[in-house]
Image: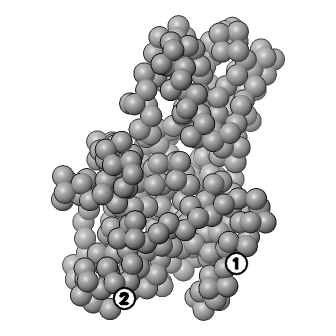
């Protein structure tokens, strides 16, 4: 898609119309919240506006929330105007990215978890870089629950009321559990069903169960702040049904690096280890839950040398 056509589509609001047709809500975050308005960019950089970059992500998947506000901070500092589109499901997010209705997905799982979306849309998507290399899909139970492996679930169906508490129906994690884990370990024959809703709803049920010392089995992933915030343990997956570890990527719409070369250089230089990523997400989600931009700034203040900025 040409730059002219992409921007024309955005001005006409096609992204919002498409999302409405799918029954989803795409809510543009206020630029005042992230400090990324045109005036702020000009005041911060003292240079001409470098263009507008729209970040599309699912806010309840907090790796995307954290990295979206990290990129907002860095790109605003470099002179770009940054806009946010909050999307509720992975499928429409990949569609919007491939069609140029958003410019970037700031924390994608394209190698394993979202491989089916990449098979469908990958020709219209640019991989800008991998910022974290050890992401994993998991299933977990409370620390006090007397099982340690997914293969033990079939013999303990009554302990969990036959329910695996999951997240969004369109998530790659949901597909992995439904299509791989359940048949591999015979959980369907044992009487288990995967209950899908949303990440927020899953966490609410997990919190209620652990507060009352009740047993629950949930779908989770790493890195994710909830693994440390709640008393849970990851179940072993001896058959590897949840797939191998994979990288978290910055994905752009086709032609992103050509249109925004300076932004692509900044983004492509970001690489975080476990400790750095964990501290970023903790600062955004737990330390500054009402102001993600402040969480990012606090993290940058504590980690001034983590992000290499290109020479001006």
Q: Is residue 8 above or below residue 18?
A: below
- The residue drawn where x is 57% and y is 72% is 102
| Residue topped by disc 2 | 49
Where is residue 269 shown, x and y percent of the image?
Answer: 33, 65
Q: Is residue 154 above or below residue 59?
A: above
- The residue drawn where x is 58% and y is 40% is 199
Q: Which quarter of the figure has residue 71?
A: bottom left
Task: In this rendered view, identify the residue nearer to me: 268 or 220.
Answer: 220
Q: Secondary structure at mark 2?
A: loop
| Residue topped by disc 1 | 14
Q: Is residue 19 left or right of residue 27?
A: right
Where is residue 257 shown, x and y percent of the image?
Answer: 46, 78
Task: In this rendered view, identify the residue nearer to me: 286 or 48.
Answer: 286
Q: Secondary structure at mark 1?
A: helix
Where is residue 120 shown, x and y percent of the image?
Answer: 72, 62
* Colour scheme in use: one colour
């Amino acid at each position: 898609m040409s730059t002219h056509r992409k921007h024309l589509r955005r001005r006409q609001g096609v992204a919002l119309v498409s999302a409405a047709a799918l029954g989803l809500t795409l809510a543009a975050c206020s630029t005042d919240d992230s400090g990324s308005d045109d005036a702020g960019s000009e005041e911060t950089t003292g240079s001409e506006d470098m263009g507008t970059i729209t970040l599309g992500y699912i806010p309840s998947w907090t790796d995307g929330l954290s990295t979206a506000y990290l990129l907002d901070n860095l790109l605003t500092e470099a002179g770009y105007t940054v806009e946010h589109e909050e999307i509720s499901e992975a499928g429409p997010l990949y569609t919007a990215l491939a069609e140029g209705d958003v410019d970037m997905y700031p924390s994608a799982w394209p190698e394993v978890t979202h491989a089916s979306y990449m098979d469908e849309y990958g020709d219209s998507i640019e991989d800008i870089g991998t910022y974290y290399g050890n992401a994993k899909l998991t299933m977990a139970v409370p620390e006090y629950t007397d099982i340690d492996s997914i293969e033990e679930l079939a013999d303990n169906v009554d302990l969990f009321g036959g329910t695996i508490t999951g997240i969004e129906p369109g998530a790659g994690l949901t597909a992995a559990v439904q299509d791989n884990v359940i048949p591999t370990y015979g959980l369907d024959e044992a009487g288990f069903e995967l209950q899908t809703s949303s990440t927020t709803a899953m966490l609410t049920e997990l919190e209620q169960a652990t507060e009352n010392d009740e047993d629950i089995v949930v779908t989770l992933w790493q890195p994710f702040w909830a693994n440390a915030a709640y008393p849970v343990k990851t179940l072993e997956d001896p058959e590897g049904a949840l797939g191998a570890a994979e990288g978290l990527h910055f994905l752009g719409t086709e032609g992103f690096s050509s249109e925004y070369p300076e932004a692509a250089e900044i983004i492509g230089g970001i690489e975080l280890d476990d400790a750095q990523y964990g501290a970023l997400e903790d600062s955004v989600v737990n330390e500054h839950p009402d102001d993600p931009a402040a969480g990012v700034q606090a993290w940058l203040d504590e980690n001034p040398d983590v992000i290499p900025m290109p020479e001006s």
